[in-house]
Amino acid sequence: MPALSPPSVTFSAADDPWIETRTGPHYSQRGLRDLFLNAQTIDDLALPHPPSASALLRIAVAITARITGLDDAELTASQWNALRRTCLQQGRFDPDAVHAYFDRHAWDVFDPVRPWLQEPALRTQCDHSSGINAFVPGRPAGNNLAWFSPHGHHTNEPVPTAEALEILLLHHYYGRSGTCTPRTVDGVTTGRKNSGPLRSSVSFHPLGRTLHETLLAGVPAFAGDEQLPGTDACPWEEALPGRQTPQALVTWPGRLLTGQSQHAILLVPGPGGTTVTDVYHTRATKEPEEPKEPEEPKNSKKAKAIVTDPYLAYRYAAGNRTKRYADASRAWWRELDTLVLAQDEHGTHVRPAVFDTLNDLPEDLRRSLRIRVHGFDQDGKATDLQWYTAITPPLLNWTQEHDPVKAQRIAECCREAEQTAQRLATAAKDAWETITGAKSRSRTAQPSWVNKAPARYWPKAETVFWRLLDEPDTDAPTAFAAAAAAALREVTEAARISHNSAARAIAYAVRDLYRRPSPLPKKTA
């Protein structure tokens, strides 16, 4: 068990540089205070890990609401929009409000009593540390083999504190579930933790011309039950670190954006606090996990409150709600139908709640506003596959509220692109089975054409998609079928040249791609 950090070991998340930012072609590191004091001069965050950037944006938006007064649940919708417009017109955050906020709270990462976003009780509640290798993504830990890394059980290289803070955010929001370092609380020892609230999700964040605009555009409006003044707190705003009970409400905006972590972490500093040498990483005592859509009506007193992250898209099916999962193989434009269409009573997909406030932004900002996409392709438990990021062009003018014809065209093209991809997979599989005479019964071991054809199809489909938006009279099914046919011919070229039977089967498959599904017969009374 390490001793308490000596007083000389400090690192302030507010005042020491650790956040990568970009201004034009220039990059620099800043602390949180500097981030807000100079937000009007910063183009964007530049964190190397998109999940950490998505987490930091949520933290920064919560702080934005605090220093601007946009966290006042008593404001009416018109008053709230007027206040945000005033903050945007000022062109920068009020320096006095920024200093007052950061001077009021604890930001020292290695403080022995109030370490930022950590739990000091882990020193006594865990009988051993977790190790730095288990904390850093990509490093092998325990009995895992070191295939692509020089790190191992005997090479616990320290991590710069600035990098460790970004990893800290990654675990709090996207952390894995399963076995962890045992923790004893109130005589009960548990060695399993839940996954983070954003695990395997894709987030959509408004992106302004400056970080000042990005943060103000990203503040979600209050859309919940009555909230008592002073009941909402971010972890660093609490007087003492304490456990959340299962009955605790997810209040807005502090706990909604910053207080749902299922992981408890404590960093062990190296000499001078410039590095982190070890970590305690275990379960948090905060519960429960995000609940599903209740079966009772929404106005039922028995219905449980649902945690709605304002930057996630959701899908409703069979009375349950699920978040839109990240998929590294899925291009961002395929999500456009969800982003531009307003929710209706028959729809199954719901765009992020933050989009509901973007139409009230000043006209010049609204027309230039883009969307930053941050995704982390993971399974639901422990496997991390790939993270990714993308920036859309300005698209708010395409939303249903501003251009319903364009929005419906986008929805039509997205739908046709997906349906054509499904027909392509079926056609490729049928052609393969016709030639080989073998049936593929395994879902995981599909014929090579089934995997290769969609990979060739989607880049072509994206080109077709953007062309169709500029050509509203062009038939979308035919255009996507042509892209699918070209992809199928490319992946089967060698087989078609070598075997007449393959050429014949592919010709029939291409014909099927151009066929449209027959409409279902109408029911008669």
Image: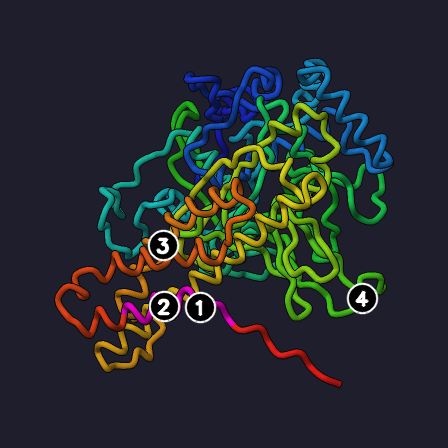
**Extreme bottom residue here?**
525
Q: Give the secondary structure at mark 2.
A: helix
Q: Which residue is mark 2?
A: 511
Taking the image as shown, residue 4 lies to the left or right of residue 432, namely right
Q: Is there a contact, CB below 8 Å, between mark 1 and mark 2?
A: yes
**What is the chief secondary structure element of the magenta stretch?**
helix
* Residue 277 point in image, percent of width and height: 38, 36
**Residue with the mark numbered 4:** 297
Residue drawn 44% across the image and 36% down it: 268
State the residue in front, 207 or 447.
Answer: 447
The Cα–Cα distance between marks 4 and 1, rounded to whole angstroms, is: 43 Å
Mark 1 to mark 2 CA distance (whole Å): 7 Å
Q: Amino acid at mark 3?
A: Tyr
Mark 4–mark 2 Cα distance, whole angstroms, equals: 48 Å
Asked whether residue 125 is in view, the answer is no
Name the residue carrying label 3. Answer: 457
Residue 427: where, in percent of width, then height?
36, 69
Q: Which residues are magenta?
A: 506-517
* Location of the N terminus (image quadrant): top left
Q: Nearer the viewer, mark 4 or mark 1?
A: 1
* Residue type pointed to by label 2: Arg
**Is 53 covered by the magenta stretch?**
no
Callout 2 crowding tier (Cα within 10 Å): few <14, some 14–19, many ≥20: few
Indicate which disc, 4 or 3, sits on the residue closer to the N terminus: 4
- Circle 1 crowding by C-alpha within 10 Å: few under 14, some 14–19, many from 20: few
Q: Nearer the viewer, mark 4 or mark 3?
A: 3
